[in-house]
Amino acid sequence: MTQIAFAGVGVDFGATRLFSDVTFTVDPGERWGIVGRNGTGKTTLFRLLTGDLEPTRGSIARASNLRVSLLEQHRDYGAATNVWEAAAGELAELLALEQSLIEQAANLAHDSSPRALARYGEDLERFEREGGYAVTARIDAVLHGLEFDPAEARVTPLSALSGGELGRLGLARQLMSTADVLLLDEPTNHLDLETTRWLEQYLAASERTVLLVSHDRAFLSATVDHVLHLEGGSATPYSAGYTDFVAQRAERRLTQQRAFEQQKRVIAKESDYIARNIAGQNSKQAKGRRKRLGRLPRLSPVTSAEGTMALRFEVGERGGDQVVMAKNVSVAVGERILVERFSGTLKRTDVVGLIGRNGAGKSTLLRALLGEHPIKKGELTVGGSISPGYYRQDLSQVPLDKTLYQVIEELRPKWERGPIQGHLGRFGFSGQEVLRRADSLSGGERARLALAILMLSRANLLILDEPTNHLDVESIEALEDAIDGYDGTVILVSHDRALLRALTTRIWVLHDRHVTEFAGGFGEWEEVSTERAHAAAVSAAEEQALRQLHERKRVAPAPKADRGKELRRVQRELEEAEAAVGVLEAEVARVVTSLDDPALYTRQGGARTAHELGAQLETLKRDLETAIERWTKATEQVEMHTPR
């Protein structure tokens, strides 16, 4: 059964036609990637899907009672006061019932009247019927997957969150919604590598329909099974994953270009015949051909596959071979140590990928390398003749109070109007756009201006902090080509795995205040450290099962002291099962911690040790699942034998 059907849909804004003749259908459970250059209409397409915008032409059919959820709709947290309530969203009523059960369970210790027991029994039955144990554990799992501590989330006020944390919370709230269709607009923007992988696994396990806009090529490759490509004022649907789409798009463009060239030759030949014979003895035939030629639908040339930017990085001076030297460097913010005893050397033409969880201190370490943040201990030296260029994640290098023309004019005061406009034109700004103030730019436009500024620096050390955050896929490909052709040194902080795989020659992993160096590119790092991903997946699955177990304990009344023989027996069985779960839980945590340490994979024999630990983790996983099952049965036995 089709959930959504677009038929010949077009949208105009005044005299401007955004796109036309968009036709595609979405069936239940499909996962669509919406791709295209910035400004081609991806956000408008989402507004059409939610019903906030009506098409100028064509029709949109939706299945009856279809519920569609857009991330932007989940930034209003209603009456929620803490992070957990905000994430629960429409499940807040179940949260209130859970809290009531906890209070009732505590009160039963001194009030076990038939009325109190009956109320508790009725509420507990409703809680179980509505999936309370599973739902609250699932909320915890989603919060944990998106880098929130579930226990702290129950007491952390919304006012304490940063902008990035609010973005992740909005995503958590959307994932917990009961909508049939999820519309995700750049869901990985506030996520690090580990969290992005978690989201991939979550979406892969979900049976809901998903349409997502993303510039993360690796994320698209891992999640979508259909692609809608907006280009040239329309959209083309592909029944393929992202990797196959790229190949099919190239073949389609080649076929279209051949057809265009063939038609152009036919038109030229016919036009020549008409011009030679319109006034001669073959005038009748020439006029007939002219009429047919006038009715011929003209094919358009293929939209350029090149990026929207003509970006190239050049070095003004070669610089020394030793670019950055660090010896036992520690970096702190206040009393909090972010990096401890870091030693390493950055050499000319290295492309180093700096990876680590959000909040680990990557941006602060970059600022310390540039001398913008003091180091707490150690020695940090920048080599002679090294000229750094810094792309800041927050784009604060862009002066917002100036026009685009003024920004470039101040950097190149000797340039005339032509070269300034030409330079801005390389980044997609033409005509009167160069007179816009920078504070009127969108995120993608501001990112392109930041790259235009960086290109003029002629730096021999580029420090790039999340440079892909606001760029579309084709602009990212242009950036990738520019870095690949660059003759200087690069430090790259990014969650774009495709970019990291294509460019990096070494990896610095910031984990638990320590920087571990891996002497290989990001693709090699992924292969070597596959057991880290395995450990994270096992940990996430077992944590959700354990949360459900602990949730059951939270709402269970304390057993009475006066117990019969059979009750005492099953209670002992429950205590033994709970103890076994605790032991195995600690063992799983120990192995996961060992596998999560990046240093393991850089030591001699580390890969073999990781493989052995991975096998041990699988055994522990099976044992823990058995123990949890035993605990569940023991709990049911205790409940059966507890007098009500």
Image (cartoon, rainbow, N blue to C red):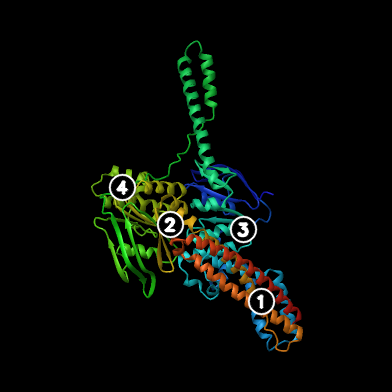
* Crowd around label 3: few <14 · some 14–19 · many ≥20 (10 Å): few
Q: CA distance from mark 1 to mark 4?
A: 65 Å
Which numbered disc flags the more N-terminal residue, 2 or 1?
A: 2
Which numbered disc flags the more N-terminal residue, 3 or 1?
A: 3
Say how many tags the image has.
Answer: 4
- Callout 3–callout 4 Cβ contact below 8 Å: no
Camera sees residue 79 = no
Which numbered disc flags the more N-terminal residue, 4 or 2?
A: 4
Side (left or right) of 273 relative to 460 = right
Which numbered disc flags the more N-terminal residue, 1 or 4?
A: 4
Residue in view at x 32 percent, y 71 percent: 376
Element marked by disc 2: loop
What residue is disc 2 on?
Answer: 494
The label shown at residue 577 is 1
Q: CA distance from mark 3 to mark 4?
A: 45 Å
What residue is disc 4 on?
Answer: 314
Foreground label between 1 and 4? 1
What residue is disc 3 on?
Answer: 205
Please state which amino acid type lies under the numbered disc 2: Ser
Residue in view at x 41 percent, y 46 percent: 478
Element marked by disc 4: loop
Q: Position of residue 406 (x, y in %)?
A: 30, 52
* Crowd around label 2: few <14 · some 14–19 · many ≥20 (10 Å): many
Q: CA distance from mark 2 to mark 3?
A: 26 Å
| Residue nearest the viewer, comparing 56 with 151 | 151
